[in-house]
Image (spheres, rainbow, N blue to C red):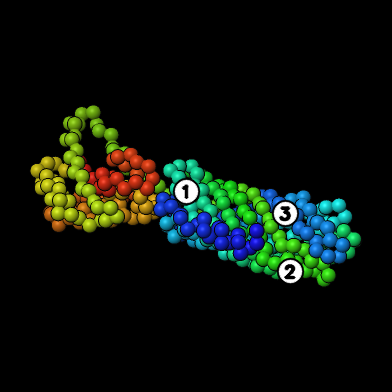
């Protein structure tokens, strides 16, 4: 397999990416380390022979940006170190450089693992030292080369640290050209590696704090009047009020003047489609629009507490990515 075929095959695999994705939304950084296995390389003159492989260490670091829909792009730096031995033929190989990668995260319905795949193109410096052919001809040289890679991996979110994920990856890296060191020619590099690492998304919002606990009621105090709750529903990905929504808000506003009310909670929610950060903003916008309509209907603004809770506290429990109408709501609670 040459470099061109590798990139074409990987690009074809990337085309039918599923609509469901666990998106990284915004900047992120990552790093990984592991083991690499450089496939045997033929020496094509000066006695020929084969450079075998004993394997070695590999390390990568990256900085990237996620678009919130599963697609990510990143800049990667890397370093490979491999001993090559096969009878009298041997060399110490170091390969290092950088790639521009495009990756796609998949949602398979699990909260603990998110697979991903991608491709990359870049440049590598190929550095062979202490080299020797089958007839004892020595070589030591460096050569820059174009390279490509394919990536298959999985991310495992760390629940205790929002935005942090552990990663496990397989990478296949190939160089575009054979290496010519003086009179010695060596076949292209084909490198297989397994890495473990960490990835951290920089702009993940922490989960909203739980609602404040109600103050304890004195034993001698009369029992409080029961709360009255009104539900206002919204179209998918919308925060504007329908005619029916305004009617329900109007009923809640009228009831404020009829009963003893000390606090009016306006709590916004979304379904599980969309990113966590986007859902948080959308739920807050819905709550603010309902609160504004209450004020318009005569409710004192200082009695209203409006807040968004994103895709938490689902009225109808669903998996991630489900557009459940009853979860797209604002609750008006009269206390």
Q: Position of residue 80 (x, y in %)?
A: 70, 57
Q: Could you tell which of marks 2 and 3 lies nearer the N-terminus?
A: 3
Residue at the disc numbered 3 = 39
Q: Which residue is mark 1?
A: 162
Please, which residue is most extreme toward the right here? 136
Q: Residue at x 24, y 51 (%)?
A: 234
Which numbered dot is residue 185? Answer: none
Q: Is residue 73 above or below residue 156?
A: below
Residue 307 visible in the shown view: no
Sequence-wise, the earlier of marks 1 and 3 is 3
Q: Residue at x 71, y 60 (%)?
A: 189
**Label 2 element class:** strand
Image x and y of residue 161, in percent: 49, 47
Q: Nearer the viewer, mark 1 or mark 3?
A: 3
Question: In the rendered structure, which disc, 2 or 1, sits on the residue that comes first in sequence?
Answer: 2
Image check: 58 left or right of 289?
right
Residue 13 higher or lower than 313, as above or below:
below
Disc 2 + disc 3, Cβ < 8 Å: no
Q: Where in the figure is residue 209, as x and y percent of width and height?
A: 37, 45
Residue 50 is situated, as x and y percent measured from the top left of the image, at 80, 56
Q: Mark 2 = which residue?
A: 143
Quadrant hosting residue 211? top left
Left or right of 62, for residue 303:
left
Local packing at callout 3 (Cα closer than 10 Å; few below 14, some 14-19, many 20+) is some
Dot 2, crowdedness within 10 Å: few (<14), some or many (≥20)?
Answer: some
Instruction: Report the residue at 43% width, 52% height from top.
Output: 18
Locate the N terminus by quadrant: bottom right
Q: CA distance from mark 2 to mark 3?
A: 18 Å
Pick the residue in front: 332 or 129: 129
């Amino acid at each position: 397999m040459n470099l061109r075929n590798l990139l074409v095959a990987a690009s074809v695999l990337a085309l039918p990416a599923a609509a469901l994705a666990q998106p990284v939304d915004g900047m992120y950084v990552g790093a990984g380390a592991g083991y690499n296995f450089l496939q045997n390389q033929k020496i094509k003159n000066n006695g020929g022979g084969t450079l075998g492989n004993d394997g070695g260490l590999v390390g990568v670091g990256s900085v990237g940006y996620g678009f919130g829909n599963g697609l990510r792009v990143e800049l990667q730096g890397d370093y490979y170190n491999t001993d090559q031995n096969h009878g009298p033929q041997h060399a110490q190989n170091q390969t290092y450089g950088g790639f521009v990668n495009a990756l796609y995260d998949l949602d398979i319905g699990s909260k603990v693992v998110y697979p991903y795949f991608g491709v990359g193109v870049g440049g590598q410096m190929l550095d062979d030292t202490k080299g020797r052919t089958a007839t004892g001809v020595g070589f030591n040289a460096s050569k820059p080369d174009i390279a490509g890679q394919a990536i298959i991996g999985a991310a495992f979110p760390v629940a205790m640290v929002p935005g942090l994920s552990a990663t496990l990856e397989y990478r296949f890296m190939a160089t575009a050209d054979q290496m010519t060191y003086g009179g010695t020619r060596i076949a292209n590099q084909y490198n297989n590696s397994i890495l473990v690492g960490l990835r951290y998304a920089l702009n993940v919002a922490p989960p909203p704090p739980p609602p404040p606990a109600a103050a304890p009621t004195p034993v001698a105090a009369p029992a409080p009047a029961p709360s009255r709750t009104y539900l206002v529903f919204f179209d998918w990905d919308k925060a504007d009020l329908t005619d029916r929504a305004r009617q329900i808000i109007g009923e809640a506003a009228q009831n404020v003047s009829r009963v003893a009310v000390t606090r009016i909670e306006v709590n916004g929610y979304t379904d599980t489609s969309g990113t966590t950060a986007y859902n948080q903003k959308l739920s807050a916008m819905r709550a603010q629009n309902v609160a504004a309509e209450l004020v318009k209907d005569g409710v004192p603004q200082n009695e209203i507490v409006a807040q968004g809770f994103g895709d938490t506290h689902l009225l109808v429990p669903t998996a991630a990515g489900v557009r459940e109408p009853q979860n797209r709501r604002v609750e008006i609670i009269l206390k």
